[in-house]
Image (cartoon, helix red, strand yellow):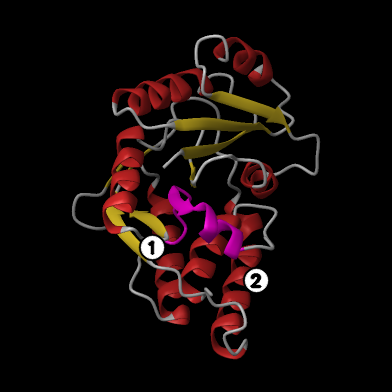
């Protein structure tokens, strides 16, 4: 099963090299057939130049520049429309996600033959390193609200780092979210539409370089929109979008 790893990158020249080398070396160590797909989201720094140099040493690296519209959701969607693998993971460019966790996701999907594998930083075995206190509070409140509204046990919906089979990803279209709310849209649609999934612990480490692209004040209403959409689909769509 070929693994595609979609990585959105905007102004990540300081982080992208370490991220991609670590990811490639880990997947190579476990002999996992893969491609690393990077969407350069029209970066204003030297991210593109760094990618061009990295392609000389990482044979599985594929990248394109998204000329626009830009934004986290658009960048991820750009890669999700173009990847070539049998399954696809969304992975961050800032070294916050652990490649060893991705291997765990992949092996779980193979072993259990599920449609998706979700990580959770808040179950036994999960951990966060240098997580900002305010952001943590907002995260836990948001995930609690999502759990209550949709009626699920999964406690880390907002975690972008997840793995989906190609057929699952096709079944989640059309994508609605242009911003970080895509991280909520994908797993909630997976659950609401009846796709199978497993949850495994994963870790998260705060970025060393640059600044987070997530602007919490801007995202509240957008997360709410997706939550309402998935609620309506679950309870009022009469199963029209369920997994066939």
Q: Which residue is mark 1?
A: 140
How far is the residue under mark 2 from the one under mark 1?
A: 18 Å
Instruction: List the residue tagged with mark 2.
Output: 225
- Rate crowding at label 2 as few (under 14), some (14 to 19) or many (20 or more) other CA atoms within 10 Å: some
- Image height of 145 relative to 155, above or below: below
Q: Quadrant of the N terminus?
A: top left
Does the image show residue 142? Answer: yes
- Residue 163 falls inside the magenta stretch: yes
Q: Residues within 10 Å of mark 1 (few under 14, many from 20)?
A: some
Residue 16: x and y, percent? Answer: 52, 23
Q: Does the image show residue 130?
A: no
Quadrant of the image occupied by residue 186: bottom right
Residue 95 at x, y percent in the picture:
43, 30
Toward the left, the furthest residue is 124
Whether residue 108 is in magenta: the answer is no
Rendering coords of residue 52 (x, y %): 64, 14
């Amino acid at each position: 099963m070929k693994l595609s790893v979609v990585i959105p990158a905007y102004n990540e020249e300081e982080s992208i090299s370490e991220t991609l080398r670590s990811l490639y070396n880990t997947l190579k160590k476990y002999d996992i057939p893969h491609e690393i797909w990077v969407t350069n989201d029209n970066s204003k720094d030297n991210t593109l130049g760094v990618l061009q140099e990295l392609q000389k040493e990482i044979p599985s690296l594929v990248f394109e520049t998204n000329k626009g519209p830009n934004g986290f959701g658009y960048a991820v969607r750009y890669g999700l429309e173009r990847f070539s693998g049998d399954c696809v993971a969304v992975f961050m460019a800032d070294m916050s996600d652990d490649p060893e966790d991705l291997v765990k996701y992949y092996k779980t999907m193979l072993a259990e033959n599920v449609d998706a594998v979700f990580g959770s930083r808040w179950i036994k075995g999960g951990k966060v390193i240098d997580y900002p206190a305010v952001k943590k509070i907002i995260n836990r409140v948001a995930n609690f609200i999502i759990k209550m509204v949709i009626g699920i046990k999964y406690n880390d919906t907002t975690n972008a780092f997840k793995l989906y089979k190609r057929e699952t990803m096709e079944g989640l279209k059309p994508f609605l979210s242009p911003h970080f709310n895509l991280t909520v849209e994908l797993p909630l649609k997976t659950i609401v539409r009846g796709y199978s999934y497993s949850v495994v612990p994963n870790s998260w480490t705060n970025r060393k370089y640059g600044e987070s692209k997530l602007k919490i004040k801007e995202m509240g209403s957008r997360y709410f929109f997706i939550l309402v959409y998935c609620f309506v689909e679950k309870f009022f769509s009469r199963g029209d979008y369920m997994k066939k």
